[in-house]
Amino acid sequence: MHLPADAASHNGAPIEWWYVVGHLRSAAHTFGYEVTIFKFNHVRPPGFSTPLSLYRTDVAITDLAGRRFHQRVTYYFPTSASLSTSRLDERVGKARLSGSSPRTMSVAASLPGGAIQLSLDSLRPTMYVGGRGYLSFGTGYTYYYSLTDLRTTGSLTVGKKAYRVTGVSWLDHQWGNWSWTSVRGWTWMALQLSNGVQLSVFDVRAAGQRVRAASILTPGGTTLTDRRMTIAASGAWRSPHTRGVYPARWTVRIPTQRAVLNVTPALPDQELYVPNEPRGSYWEGTGTVSGTWQGRRVSGLSYTELTGFAPA
């Protein structure tokens, strides 16, 4: 993997996405947000006789003061997409991610009920997930890196009110090739702890295998990989949109770090749902962390992604 060149789009990768989430504050108001740009090459949508490329944007704002979750999942044909293969400048519909990654970027998107316009500045070394940024995934593979500590400034619009916001964001970029039928779903978390430790933890349920791991970025900038991590779910929430049943709270344990981290969603309903395609829906939400790390109390922020729980 070579950055910043690999921040751009990869023509040879049938599947690729850029994913940005974060935690924002404006005076007493707090928000979570998500902007994700997807590329799917060589897919055959219903009613089409030949494969084509499809693009998708997922945009969401969690308004914690208003206790509301605004979300929109939108599919696009290639005429609505422009993905650069030479630099980070990826546009699909009204969503755009651009800049000189991994140092300085901007992200913008809109949805009914809100808009996002943010500047991102990476403060930490790149996390190469799994240790080198290359993982087996289902029947194929994925390249995968994260920028875990993005200083964030800009504006957020919710309803008719605009807020000047500051906060912290997280960027994931994945690209590769695998069969979706071989991947049943996953639980994934971006955890940013008060002691400076930042973690990407995942539990992937694939055909014939279960892959669990934690990529740990230390305050000194070293990435550690621990495959003895576990995620235990407790409680449940049933979606009124898809009738899917999702876990509601989690405990992450990493014995080698004497870590017990309790992750709690900020709102129960943070499901991004596709009315005409329930199986494409998933839960993606902001939350908090409490617990211990190496025997000492820590707190933190979380973003959790749950796929494979919505009914087919």
Image (spheres, rainbow, N blue to C red):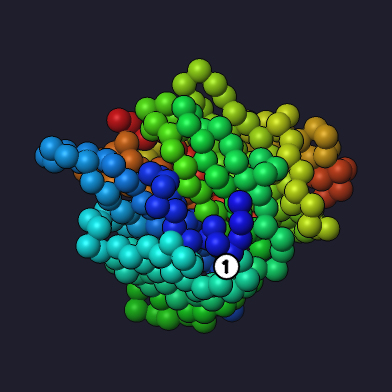
Residue drawn at x 70%, y 68% is 123
Q: Secondary structure at mark 1?
A: loop
Count neighbours of disc 1 (C-alpha within 10 A) and say few if under 14, some if 14 to 19, many if 20 or more. many
* Residue position marked by numbered label 1 in the rendering: 101
Q: Residue at x 32, y 36 (%)?
A: 279
Near-viewer residue (25 or 67): 25
- Report which quarter residue 291 is drawn in: top right
Please determine whether, in this image, residue 171 is positioned above or below residue 168. Answer: above
In the rendered structure, the answer to whether residue 185 lies left or right of residue 211 reads left
Look at 50% across and 18% down and name the residue there. 208
Which residue corresponds to the image point at 40% horizontal and 69% vertical from the top-left? Answer: 96
Between residue 242 and residue 294, name the one nearer to us: 294
Q: Nearer the viewer, residue 31 or 131?
A: 131
The amino acid on which the numbered mark 1 sits, given as a three-letter code, is Ser
Task: Please give left or right for residue 218 compared with residue 145 in the image.
Answer: right
Residue furthest top in the image: 208
Q: Residue 138, image x and y in percent?
A: 48, 29
Residue 30 left/right relative to 300: left
